[in-house]
Amino acid sequence: MKKLWTGSMFLILVLSLYGQSLNFEELTSKEIRELAKANVTVIVPIAQIENHGLYLPVATDLYLTREICRKAAEKNGKSIVAPAIQLGNCSDYTAWPGYIVVRNQTFLDIVEDYLSSLKQQGFQNVVFCLMHGGHNFNSIDIAVSERNRELGMKVQIVSMNVLMSPIWKEISELLLKGKIDPELTMMMALKPNLIKDEKSAGKMAQPQLPSFMGLGRYYDPEYTLDKIAPDGMVAYSEKATAAIGEKLMDMLSSGLAERVLKRLTD
Ligand SMILES: [Zn+2]
């Protein structure tokens, strides 16, 4: 076992020396075989394509989740980031154009096949990392609990909400006073050229949600999200900055590296 760890650390060191990211998609088949033998942890970013208000692109979740996973893999040093699962059941966002919905069953099948593929190649440890909770979190849980009885892998499912909860006080100091949307700040840091029409977006009010909406899922035709927030759920704040976004991504990726990856890789 000790020898395997030495092997994985050496391989990752060699990869990073050659300026390669720890990205499954950019590695050769031979390198992936070696990393599987060395039992590195595989991080799978999960995102959905859906409306993100007037000024953020519909793939916001994808860009942010991938980046947080990439930073976490770099900090951990014994993990790689696998191709994202970028389609999910975002059926509660279909009031606005810009979505691709896959049904729950399709999503369950993708997650099960994904896990089986990793197992066939020799990987044992997998972390699914979601930008949002909702349908996809539940579906991954069902898919993993069903399939993993047979596969016997170590799998952890985490969402950004889960990563935020132990550092909630620091995060609220960073965001709440300025009513700053976390996704906006992180996109300012990561892909500022994709933020559209900031000035007109600045006039958009923060949507006022009825209090029951914070209490788990609801299904009620009178309270569809587009009636409450016609342009989408993300509101602009003048106080949002790229520096805040950079800090937030750093906190979330450290949370992923220290609270999740460390346990699997040490
Ligand atoms: Zn989002």
Image (cartoon, rainbow, N blue to C red):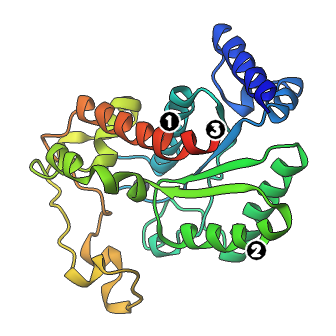
Which comes sooner in the sequence, label 1 or label 3?
1
* Front residue (pair 232, 107): 107
What secondary structure is marked by label 1?
helix
Give the numbered dot on residue 67: 1
* Front residue (pair 182, 265): 265
Q: Along the horizontal axis of the image, is 2 left or right of 95?
A: right
Q: Label 1 vs label 3: CA separation?
A: 20 Å
Instruction: Answer yes or no: is residue 48 visible.
Output: no
Q: Along the horizontal axis of the image, is 87 left or right of 209?
A: right
Which comes sooner in the sequence, label 2 or label 3?
2
| Marks 1, 2: nearer the viewer | 2
* Front residue (pair 214, 150): 150
Residue designated by label 2: 146
**Percent position (x, y) of residue 208?**
17, 72
What is the three-letter code of the residue carrying label 2? Glu
Q: Residue furthest left?
A: 177
Please give the name of the residue rendered at 74% of the width and 21% of the height, measured from the top-left corner.
Answer: 6
What is the three-letter code of the residue carrying label 1? Glu
Residue designated by label 3: 265
Which comes sooner in the sequence, label 1 or label 2?
1
What is the three-letter code of the residue carrying label 3? Thr
Q: Label 2 vs label 3: CA separation?
A: 24 Å
Question: Is 30 drawn above or below residue 164 in the view shown?
Answer: above
